[in-house]
Amino acid sequence: MPADANLLAREKSPYLLQHAHNPVHWHPWGHAALQAAQAEQKPILLSVGYAACHWCHVMAHESFEDPETAALMNRLFVSIKVDREERPDIDHIYMSALHALGEQGGWPLTMFLTPDGTPFWGGTYFPPEPRWGRPSFRQILQAVADAYRAGDKSVATNGATLKRALAAASATTPGDAPGPALLASVAHAYLRVTDPVHGGLRGAPKFPNAPIFRFLWQHGQRTGEPEIAAAVHLMLRRMSLGGIYDHLGGGYARYSTDAQWLAPHFEKMLYDNAQLLELLAFAQAAAPDPLYAARATETVAWLTRDMMTNGAFACAEDADSEGEEGKFYVWSDSEIGALLGPDAASFAAAYDVTPNGNWEGKTILRRVTPPGNEAAEAALAHDRARLFTARATRPRPGRDDKILADWNGLMIAALARAAAIFREPAWLALASSAYRNLRALLTTPDDRLHHAWRDGTITAAGLLDDHAAIARAALALFESTGDQTYLTDAQNLAASALVWFADTDGSFYTTASDAPDVPAIRPRTAADNATPNANGLMAEVFARLHHLTGDPAWRTRATAIITSFSGAADKIAAQSTLLAAADLLENATTIVVAGDPATPEAQALLAAALASPDPATIVLRAPPDTQLPALHPAFGKSPPAHAAAAAFLCRDGVCGMPVLNAESLIVQGQGSALDPSRRRRASHDGALYQRP
């Protein structure tokens, strides 16, 4: 195609294809685009978004589809469009630059770069006309281009400043391994900013912040502080009753625009639902609740019904349909009445359906009444099914069906853990099948991983996130099934990450050492975002490998990652996944079930072990015809002569006496995290917060 044309039609990303017919002469990210900018000596306009992003659609309709704006872009800039899910490494670089400018991040991300890719200014959404005290996008375009052409000193100064900021952000800050006092300090700091009424963190917009609450949950399991468990339970319950949850089709939206979990931007992301499914499972293990079981079951139903693609999981569903945000999901009082007839009144009372609506004149369904008796709940379930059938006739939001290795890894691990706790063996089969299909699609000839696949084509090279998340998924499947293939896979992926992503200090870069098109700074971070950070996940993988094999080399590697980032006191609270890995390394309980795993006795012990509410529990089988590694503290352990199977609880390199039945294992396990009295306390404290 000629340079003065939109080049996105040949791409596979659904987000890029959404822009393939814009009058803008878009380039996809890559060497060719950078070379075009250098040849034309034009600044680069970089636009980053994703297919399910509502405000990305708004800016596209207002500006990128507008011929006048497109003509200005084509004359003044080389315009590059990036799918942030396909290239999170590029997104991270330029989002970090925006933060360094003192701006709040978000998508669409709009950055202006010199022809070599150096950022010098940017923002997020810009309106088509002056609005809210902000200039129009066209005014911004002209002003930035004028400054660049005039050799304005601020362009060079900003570029140099941002390059230094990016280098600093990618640097490590070594320190001591986090100890109990630091973990407690971070946990209590987060606890102080939780919302005591609606759950989650205070304020709006309100995100699940799953890595933070996953860390809080694990810390609470260690310390037994009931207020920590209560905070996690409160968030899960409020979200599961609120409008952020799809009460007809299952699955959680990305975030709520308000502080009460009522009104989401309706996109559903695979990564959110993976992390929330795992949290629901841990919460269920500690304090069983029919609400958790229902939401987990409904979310997996959504996953299998709407998100399966090529044997793995698609990455997102859009917020918009028919050009309107949330149109697929919202209702009017009259629609409910027409569909449900005499049942409409009881349904309306339960789900906040009113003549005036609860959001922009429409109703977002949310559960506002406590559970009724069995007959009442059955009637509401029947009503929901009728509405679901009617909703299915509406034009659906778009689906981004590309397959991302890291997000699939999060979901596979969540399914494996949830399968044991909710007693759903089909979920484990789904996780195993998705893992096999994903590996077939995304494994390279040298046993590395690609990042993204769609429509028969690999669309992005592998990142640290992919290797860490899939290795973690392999370990979850190994613990759930005992299949040694998964353990071997995890070890191979960890070894590959050491070759291609590791720095000499033991930390890891986001991009591989042979990545061909990463400008200026090779990104590296330990901070979590909406997804858990890859350095934190890799530290967890290494820690689990140490506890599973007894090999001290894995401990050394986990410690190296953790201590590479622990010296920055002002950043440590943003590293909740890394902190959870530090706790796992030092405080994990490995439950070794010795004996024939097919016997009822071993099955009962394994079921109890795998249903632990503590994320720092590791489960290992020791069949009679195999030997654990000689370095493992359970090496040589076997059941007593009179027993078919026994469990050994190993902590700090020492294993206890054999435990012969599941009830005793629950009492002795996890210090006290599996202790029935703690389970009762967690349930009681969670109930202190009344449902809306």
Image (cartoon, grey):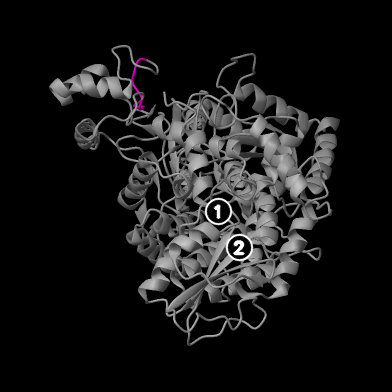
**Left/right of residue 60 with respect to residue 378 in the rendered view:** right
Residue 457 shows in the view: no
Question: Is 451 in front, or is 659?
Answer: 659
Tag on residue 419? none
The quarter of the picture where residue 151 lies is top right
Residue 138 in the image: x percent, y percent? 61, 24
Farthest bottom residue in view: 625
Q: Which residues are magenta?
A: 361-367
Disc 2 element: strand
- Residue at 47%, 28% (x, y): give it: 261
- Residue at 61%, 77% (x, y): give it: 634
Q: Which residue is mark 1?
A: 614
Q: Amino acid at mark 1?
A: Asp
Magenta segment includes 207: no
Q: Overall secondary structure of the magenta stretch?
A: loop
Is 98 drawn above or below residue 434 in the view shown?
Answer: above
The quarter of the picture where residue 559 lies is bottom right
Is 80 drawn above or below residue 507 in the view shown?
Answer: above
**Badge 2: residue crowd in 10 Å (few <14, some 14–19, many ≥20):** many
**Left/right of residue 567 with respect to residue 357 in the rendered view:** right
**Badge 1: residue crowd in 10 Å (few <14, some 14–19, many ≥20):** many
Q: Are marks 1 and 2 in contact (CB under 8 Å)?
A: yes
**Left/right of residue 399 with respect to residue 514 in the rendered view:** left
Number of numbered callouts drawn? 2
Residue 597 shows in the view: yes
1 or 2: tag closer to the N-terminus: 2
Distance of label 1 from label 2 (alpha carbons): 9 Å
Disc 1 element: loop
- Residue at 56%, 35% (x, y): give it: 231
Q: Which residue is mark 2?
A: 589
Farthest left residue in view: 342
